[in-house]
Amino acid sequence: MERTLRVFRFNPETGQEPHYDTFTIEVEDSWTVLDALNEIKWHHDGSLSYRRSCRHGICGSCAMMVNGKNEATCEKPLSALKGTITVEPLKSFPVIKDLMVDQEDFFEKLRLVKPWLINHKAPPTDKERLQSPEDRKIIDGTWECILCGACTSSCPAFWDNQGFLGPAALLKAFRYVGDTRDEGLDERVGILDSKIGVWRCHTIFNCVEACPKSLNPTAAIVKLRRRLIQEKL
Ligand code: SF4
Ligand code: FES
C-alpha cells in the first residue's frame, strides 16, 4: 500500500526557506507515523532529521505535529489517518533542523520545579520510604509523563509567554508536591507561585487534548493552586 507524507523541512545551514517535501512510499498496514519517517530516512532521503529512540511510547523523543495535532509518532498508526499525512515539528519550540526541535528551555523549566523527592529526614535503613496505597493513588496520572513536550507545545499560555513553566513542568511539580513523602513545597513555592508559575495557566485544556499518554496537566495545575492557597491560609 502507498501513503503520501508531506514533511516540514528546514536546514539553517543552507539558507533555504522552510518548506515541505512530499514523499510517496510503500508502507505496511501495521506501521506508525514514525515507521514511515524511518522508511523515508533510510530509503529515500537520509538528510531528514527527527528524534526518536524507544519506538514504544516510553522515551518521549518522537513527539511531532501530525495533521496539526501533537502526537507521539511511534504510537500513531498510519491506518488512523486519512489521505496525505502532514508532519511538522512541535509548535513554539525553536526548530533545529526539519522535525527536530530545541528542548533545552523545556528541560530547564523542568529543572526549575526540582523534579525529585525532597525530604531531609534520613530514610529508614531497613526499608524504602513507604506510603499507603491511598497516598500512592494521589500521584496517579503524573508519574506516567514521558516528557515529550506535546502539552507545552500546544499551550496558548506558553505561546503567549514562553517564560511560562508550561503544563509538563507543572504536572511534574505535582508529581512531587502531591507525594506524601515529599517535604519540598517550601523550596518550590517561589517558582510555582511566581509570574511564570501556576497562575499563568488559563485552563484552556489544550494540553489534555495533546497528551499522547492521556494525562491531565490542567488538573495537576489546579491541585497545585489549591496547595498554594492552603499554604497561604
Ligand atoms: Fe507529554 Fe503528556 Fe507528559 Fe505533557 S503530560 S510531556 S504531553 S506525556
Ligand atoms: Fe520513544 Fe516514541 S520513540 S516515545
Image: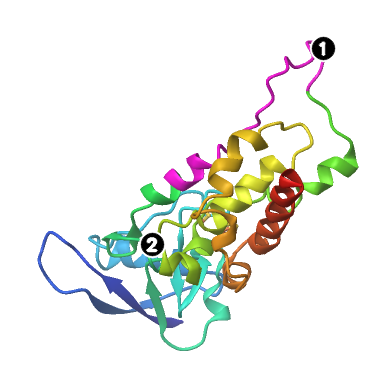
Q: Which residues are magenta?
A: 108-128
Tell which residue pokes out farthest to the left in this image: 15
- Residue designated by label 1: 126
Q: Residue at x 51, y 63 (%)?
A: 150
Mark 2 packing: few (<14 Cα in 10 Å), some, or many (20+)? some
Q: Main secondary structure of the magenta part?
A: loop
- Exactly how many numbered labels are in the figure? 2
Name the foreground residue: 84 vs 131. 131
Q: Which mark is residue 139?
A: none
x then y, percent, for residue 58: 58, 50
Which residue, given by chain and number where applicable, does mark 2 sit on?
38
Q: Can residue 126 be found in the magenta stretch?
A: yes
Q: Nearer the viewer, residue 5 or 98?
A: 98
Query: Does 133 sit above or below residue 55?
Result: above
Identify the secondary structure beneath mark 2: helix
Q: Residue at x 79, y 24 (%)?
A: 129
First-in-chain label (1 vs 2) = 2
